[in-house]
Amino acid sequence: MCDACATLPPSARGLTVLVALTIACSANVEVAKAEQAFNLWRYEARYRTVGHCLDSVLASSAVVITEQESASIHHCTHRSVVRWDLLRVDLDEAVSTLEALGRAPVLLVEDWEGPNLRGRFPTSRLANLDWQPRTDIGSDTRVQLFDPGDRGQSRDVITDWFVSPDASAR
């Protein structure tokens, strides 16, 4: 037993330990809230939400060019994935090659990845992502799907917002 507790009357020792534990637990809960520990499920749910959304809208010939979402997209959609951060050729060349092979390349980019994509491919016309995305998913981190075939088109492209189906259950 600690020396400080030894100076207390025996009847107050249990209550003192209980109060100290309550204070320590309350402080830890406040730290966890500040660090967003209780919102992590919602933030990370974007991988599953995006994967299931794309599984329902992508053609079987689609190839998803992405970075952060690569593993979850492959897992949820069983479509081919190309990591743009690992490409050894220019992005435009990779897209042209995939199209020549009869594949349907699409770009999937989280909002924070846009500057990295443009920095990695500074001469690419596609890396600018200067056209309307097909989908816009999420709130804290937005994930957008761009079809290079839409670039330069004057037609309207429907942009859908998706919310994780689990969000309403929590």
Image: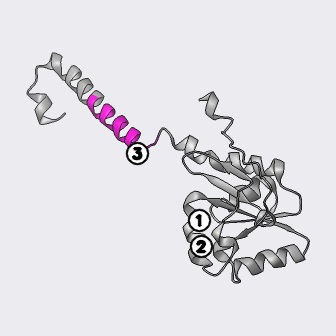
Considering the numbered disc 1 on the image, is that residue within a helix, a strand or a loop? Answer: helix
Q: Please, is residue 88 above or below residue 134 in the view? A: below
Please name the residue that numbered disc 2 is placed on.
Answer: 118
Nearer the observer: mark 2 or 3; the answer is 2
Which residues make up the magenta segment?
23-37
Front position in the image: 135 or 16: 135
Front position in the image: 156 or 110: 156
The amino acid type, in three-letter code, at marker 1 is: Gly
**Residue 69: x percent and y percent?**
66, 59
Residue at the image position 34 percent from the left and 36 percent from the top = 30
Which residue occupies the extreme top position in the image?
A: 11
Please name the residue that numbered disc 1 is placed on.
Answer: 114
The amino acid type, in three-letter code, at marker 2 is: Arg
**Which numbered circle lies on residue 170?**
none
Please name the residue that numbered disc 3 is placed on.
Answer: 35
Q: Please, is residue 6 above or below residue 72 in the view? A: above
Measure the alpha-carbon separation of dots 2 and 1.
6 Å
Residue at the image position 67 percent from the left and 78 percent from the top = 124
